Image: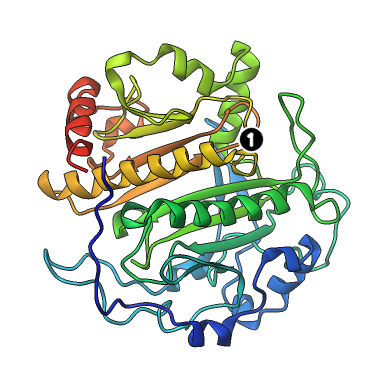
Amino acid sequence: MSEQFEVDPNPQQLSREALNKILQAESIDQFSVPELFDLFRQDPELVKFQPDAMYQVDPRDGVVVLYNSARARRPHDYPEPPAGAKTATSCPICEGKTTGVIDVADLSEGFTFINKNLFPVLYPLVDGPVDQVAAAGDRLPYGLHFLQWTSSLHERDWHNMPLADRVVAMQRLAALEQKLLHESAAVMPPTLSANGAPATRGFVSIFKNYGLMVGGSLSHGHQQICYSNVMPRQIQNNWRFGQQRGELFASYMLRENPRELLVRDYGEAVLMVPYFMKRPYNTMLLLKDTTKQYLHQLSAAEMEAVTTGWQDATRAILTIMPKIGRATAYNVITFNGPGAGLYFEFLPYTQEIGGLEQLGLWICQGNPQSVAKQLQDTLADF
């Protein structure tokens, strides 16, 4: 299998000169977590767009709803351009019109970097460090909201970056995850632990939105990292699965998912179509060592396997969606923490949600076996 990349002789990108104007630190290791909280509080731009400082829980299914009215004012450069056209010529990230950068690492071309989300769904408590969360019954979410820009080159992302660059980008995500989970005693309450791992603090949610239809606003490739005192519902589901069944969800899937739904084996991880696929071309990437719960626990070989799985899954989505007449849009969700093992879901927007789905009865316009075969055939061309 060879790596194929298109080389733009004049790529749109964020220059080092523009980066230096917004650079606040070369590495997140230069900050303690309380200092990161202060950095967010002291940013005058973030103050303009801070959340409504409340959340609610749907009592029917436990879904957590965070509120931020200011996010309606986010800039967008979607919808997608016509076939064959380049992406938007004006990109605020490439122009350096964004918040302070707190972590940067060189790639073979350009660099990957992490900054503060200008339109955060989570914000630090104004009163500073806390020993415990608000009294029971209060709906007071708090935390931090970051962005990782996969590459300073506008057109580069997981699907077309070389392996070494993908690993660097994932390593920086892992470094941020580790710092937040293990160095936050002064600002975040302890959370659940499993598999004998030390207790962590708060919840680190890592996800990717690509395309207007799935929540993406800027086409420059990026991931979002939310650090919160509020447990996302799917993390609760993984924990409950482990408690009820006596095994992690990843372990269950590695054993029970039919062999014919395997898309590709990377040695340390596997890409598969789940037997309960809700939407066509949904895939899961599962780490085989289910004692690992977080990105920062991965070995070098596991890191390579995970980033190659990310590349294959996103390449397949970008190849297939135009062929089936859909605007390219997808989410990538990282499932870390207790009850999960470590796995990722790739969720292309291939079918709308209708009334039956709102009732909890999902109708899928495809079947897992046919989808798995098409994904295998698509990746064989790379």
Looking at the rendering, which quadrant does residue 146 occupy? bottom right
Q: Does 301 sit above or below residue 107?
A: above
Residue at numbered disc 1: 337
Residue found at x 60% / y 65%? 51
Give the residue displayed 32% in from the left and 14% down from the top.
259
Q: Residues within 10 Å of mark 1 (few under 14, many from 20)?
A: many
Q: Is residue 14 above or below residue 109?
A: below
Residue drawn at x 22%, y 43% as measured from the top left: 382
Q: Is residue 191 left or right of residue 346?
A: right
Looking at the rendered structure, the kind of residue marked 1 is Gly
Q: Please give left or right for residue 100 compared with residue 31 in the image.
A: left
Above or below, comparing residue 194 to residue 113 in the picture: above
Of 6 and 337, the residue lying toward us:
6
Q: State which quarter of the image contains the N terminus.
A: top left
Residue 242: image location, x then y, percent: 61, 19
**Secondary structure of residue under mark 1:** loop
Residue 355 coordinates in the image, percent (x, y): 28, 35
- Front one among 51 and 253: 253
* Colouring convention used in this rendered image of the protein: rainbow
* Picture residue at 56% right of the left edge, 28% below the top: 237
Please count the marks in the image: 1
Q: On the image, which quarter does residue 340 sit in?
A: top right
- Front one among 201 and 55: 201
Outermost residue toward the right in this view: 131
Above or below 41: residue 222 = above
User: Residue 361: x, y in percent?
Assistant: 32, 25
